[in-house]
Image: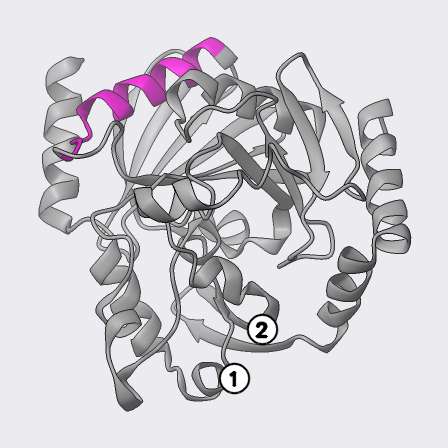
Amino acid sequence: MNDLEREIEYLLLSQKQDWKLAEENYASLANTQTRYFQGDYRTTILQYNPERIRSSCAKIDKTSLRMRPCLFCHRPKEQRSVAYNSMFDILVNPYPIFEEHLTVPLRWHEKQQIKPYYEDMLDIVSDLSDYALFYNGPKCGASAPDHMHFQAGKKYEFPVVRNWLNFSKLMVWESERASIYASDDLLPVCFILASRDKDEAAAAFDLLYDVMPVGPDDYEPMMNLLVWMEDEVWLTCVFPRRELRPSCYYAEGDANILISPATVEMAGLFVAPLEKDFKKVTFADLEKIWKEVSITEEEKNELIRKIEKEV
């Protein structure tokens, strides 16, 4: 265990003891209910977690963001941090999905954007090899799109980390020490970047990023990212998106399911803040959510064609 890992272990322990909000919410994880859906090669998980209602229902329109103080610039006085390099702080997330749930905000106020900070994700998982780091795009599940941040949890909490080797996938691009794979006939659509070299990992990410479409009112492509390390290989799972929320989120009556997908859901762990949804949701419902918020197979194939033209 390195010094940073020890600091974070102490931070988690002390915040769960000394910060009432964190103490109560982490204690409530012991009562979290879980359902498992076994499909082909993978297990998809549904977690009933009432405290995550804030994230699921977060209003991220410009007016709502202007009306509230920034969550990271105006932290509770009880919330302590561990410094990471000259740019980021590591915090305990007081509304956890996992027993070790961290938030990693930029030290200054800047909108959520991944391209300038992707290499920082690689650095952080190098130093915290038991964790996976994830990024929710500003219209892809981020409840604080006004302030650049990542989140982190132990990597084996994410089903995709356990399952990605068994994916049916296509080789899209490779260099001497990096590769880009695309899922083949799989929900949700994803690209896997694998590299033993940090510079080549960044080059592979830039290549994919630059061929992804940007909406007329957006400043970056819609996506979720999950980054982790295995055997000194950086792995990045990129989930391109076309919708913030599925149709069931807005439906009325029995058709309503209050699930707002972010990286955790795209990676196979769905969080249901309402008990009614936890009890009634089927795997077909989860697949429909993936299908509606993910890009289509044709859109994926168009990205592949664009990558091949760049090579």
Q: What residue type is labelled 1?
A: Glu
- Is residue 158 found inside the magenta-colored segment of the image? no
- Please, which residue is most extreme toward the front here? 67
Q: Nearer the viewer, residue 120 or 306?
A: 120
The part of the image, by quadrant, that contains residue 268 is bottom left
Q: Which residue is drawn at 38% across and 20% down?
A: 115
Label 2: which residue? 50
Q: Which residue is drawn at 63% across and 37% down?
A: 74
The part of the image, by quadrant, that contains residue 221 is top left
Q: Residue 75's x, y, as percent? A: 67, 39
Q: In which quarter of the image is the N terminus?
A: top right
Q: Marks 2 and 1, Cα distance to the nearest angstrom?
A: 8 Å
Main SS of the magenta segment? helix
Q: Magenta part of the protein: which range?
A: 199-215
Q: How crowded is mark 1: few (under 14 residues within 10 Å), some or many (20 or more)?
A: few
Q: In which quarter of the image is the C terminus?
A: top left
Which label is found at residue 41? none
Q: Which residue is drawn at 25% across and 83% down?
A: 252
Label 1: which residue? 275
Q: How crowded is mark 2: few (under 14 residues within 10 Å), some or many (20 or more)?
A: some
**In this rendering, would 19 be left or right of 70?**
right
**In this rendering, would 142 be left or right of 249?**
right
Helix, strand, or loop for circle 1?
helix
Q: Residue 257's x, y, as percent? A: 35, 77
Q: In this view, does 85 lie above or below 157?
A: above
Q: Is residue 266 visible from the viewing direction of this image?
A: yes
Q: Residue 304's x, y, as percent? A: 16, 32
Q: Is residue 177 visible from the viewing direction of this image?
A: no
Name which of mark 2 and mark 1 comes first in the sequence: 2
Q: Is residue 205 above or below residue 226?
A: above
Helix, strand, or loop for circle 2?
helix
